[in-house]
Image (cartoon, helix red, strand yellow):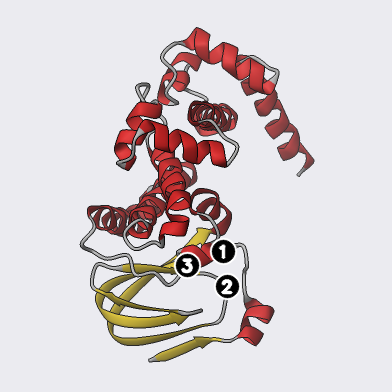
Amino acid sequence: MRTEATADAIRRHGQPDRLYASMKLSGHDTLQQGDREAVTRTGDFVVIDARPAVCEANTGISLVVDLPRERFEAMLGPSRLFCALTVGADLASTILANTFIQELVRVGDQLTPDAAARMASIGTDLIIASLAERMAQEVPGSVHGNVTVQRAKAYVEANLSDPTLDPPQLAAAMGVSLRRLQELFHERGRHISDYIWERRLEAAARRLADPACAHLSIGMLAYGCGFASQAHFARRFKARHGLAPREYRIASAMSGSSAKADL
């Protein structure tokens, strides 16, 4: 079966803010987008965006997953860098991502909406991590630094809860020296440690505002975002958001109640 997404169809029906991952459960497909041709076999997956593409499905079954483009590009760079790139089942991260997504689909109707959203977020991060690993395999030297930084960012996202995560550990995980990783972040106007704390604080703010996390104490929430002490968390959070964590949680709850009342 040959399926084509034409420029006209995309203009009329496309969703430019979305990406789509096609996970090959059996058989094999061939997909063309831009100047790339991806051949996917059982266990592989490929991501495409809202650009003209042609897919020839020869045999088997595929699972197509709708994904948030902004989140992927924040971690991996412009979608043209990773779209139509075969992510093979030879990577352990691909096996993990495929297995998790398939199991999530299987048990999805047994989850509450909040739990389903959190699990979907984890699945998205697993796909990002697998793509980052694949991008690092065959990348021109001129953009290798950019891919290393994007892989590092994806690693940070997946390990925010680890209080021992620091620049030396991150460099070791990326297989580069600390000095080299610092240089790559500095070239992009960032410091590694500042980036890690920024992501931890953003994760904490999301959880403080999430009704599904209301049962967590401030201390438990802080530890879950990688802070070793509640006092340290409170200082950094107030410096960033202008409110103490408890005040931020209360303000978010009141804002949510007002929005529901307006409806």
Q: CA–CA distance between discs 2 and 3?
A: 9 Å
Q: Position of residue 131 (x, y in %)?
A: 38, 57
Res 112 seen here: no
In what element is the residue under mark 3? strand
Which residue is farthest bottom? 1
Q: Which residue is depicted at the point 47% across and 16% down?
A: 217
Judging depth in this view, the residue of 181 and 197 nearest the camera is 181
- x%, y% of residue 105? 35, 59
Give the mark nearest the N terminus, 2 or 3. 3
**Which quadrant holds the C terminus?**
top right
Please rate how many residues cluster around mark 1, counting C-alpha atoms within 10 Å: few if below 14, some from 14 to 19, many from 20.
some
Disc 3 from disc 1: Cα separation: 7 Å
How many residues crowd mark 2 within 10 Å: few (<14), some (14–19), many (20+)? many
Frontmost residue, 180 versus 138: 180
The residue depicted at 70 percent of the width and 18 percent of the height is 242
Answer with the quarter of the image where residue 152 lies.
top left
Q: In the shown orientation, is residue 121 left or right of residue 42?
A: right
Q: Position of residue 123 (x, y in %)?
A: 39, 51
Q: Amino acid at mark 2?
A: Ala
Please report contact status of discs 2 and 1: CB closer than 8 Å, yes or no.
yes
Any mark on residue 50, and which? 2
On screen, residue 114 above or below 90: above
In the figure, 173 relative to 134: above or below? above
Mark 3–mark 1 contact, CB under 8 Å? yes
Instruction: Kindly identify which residue carries mark 1.
Output: 18
Q: Earlier in the sequence, mark 2 or mark 1?
A: 1
Please name the residue shown 41% across and 19% down the image.
Answer: 223
Percent x, y of residue 50: 57, 72
For mark 1, give the secondary structure: strand
Please give the residue where the numbered disc 3 appears in the rendered image: 20
